[in-house]
Amino acid sequence: MEKMEDKKNLVKALLEVQNEIENPKSSEVNPYYRSKYAPLPHILNLIRPLLNKHGLVLYQDVGSTKDGEICVRTHLIHESGESLTTSPLYMKPESKGNKGSTPQAMGSAITYARRYQILALLGIASEDDDANLASRPGRPTR
């Protein structure tokens, strides 16, 4: 595991970003859950100027497993060369019957994973998280 004391420039820059950043506005509606969320392009438009101002670059790589899961990792790199990488996030795209995942389902899973990795890495959240319904406890069973 990398030591954070070896990333003093990156941590200082990230602290400066977090002092200036605001949570993204939830401007899109998820019709399935009838909830609002901040779309990836809006998040990127919000964070890029702040990251660049403080010498930070964000990039994400996407891959897949043999089982059809997509994998996203997010990297934050400081101009000094110091970097921070998230753990891989694996997601299984929805399948359409016995045909497997469609390209649209793959794209949706990639976008979802990218969005949530950025939010977590920068310590921000959209105003009305579209995962709220997923996190609500179910009714107790008897």
Image (tube, grey):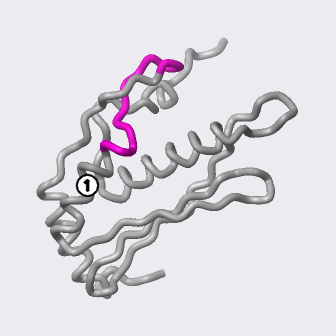
| Type of amino acid at the residue the image marks with label 1 | Ile
The x, y position of residue 138, in whole percent, is 55, 20
Most distant residue in the top direction: 142
The x, y position of residue 24, in whole percent, is 25, 41
State the residue position of label 1: 47
Crowding around mark 1 (Cα neighbors within 10 Å: few <14, some 14 to 19, many 20+) is many
Q: Residue at x 42, y 66 (%)?
A: 59
Tag 1, which secondary structure? helix
Most distant residue in the front direction: 103
When asked about the image quadrant of residue 4, the answer is bottom left
Horizontal placement of 124 versus 74: left or right? left
Horizontal placement of 19 versus 131: left or right? left
Q: Residue 2 lies in magenta, yes or no?
A: no
The x, y position of residue 125, in whole percent, is 31, 43
Q: Which of 45 and 82 is in front in this view?
A: 45
Horizontal placement of 21 versus 58: left or right? left
**Image: 67 above or below 101:** below
When asked about the image quadrant of residue 92, the answer is top right
Q: Which residue is drawn at 22% across and 68% down?
A: 52
Q: Give the range drawn in magenta.
A: 31-42
Q: Nearer the viewer, residue 30 or 123?
A: 30
When asked about the image quadrant of residue 142, the answer is top right
Q: Which residue is drawn at 36% across and 70% down?
A: 76
**Image: 4 above or below 65:** below
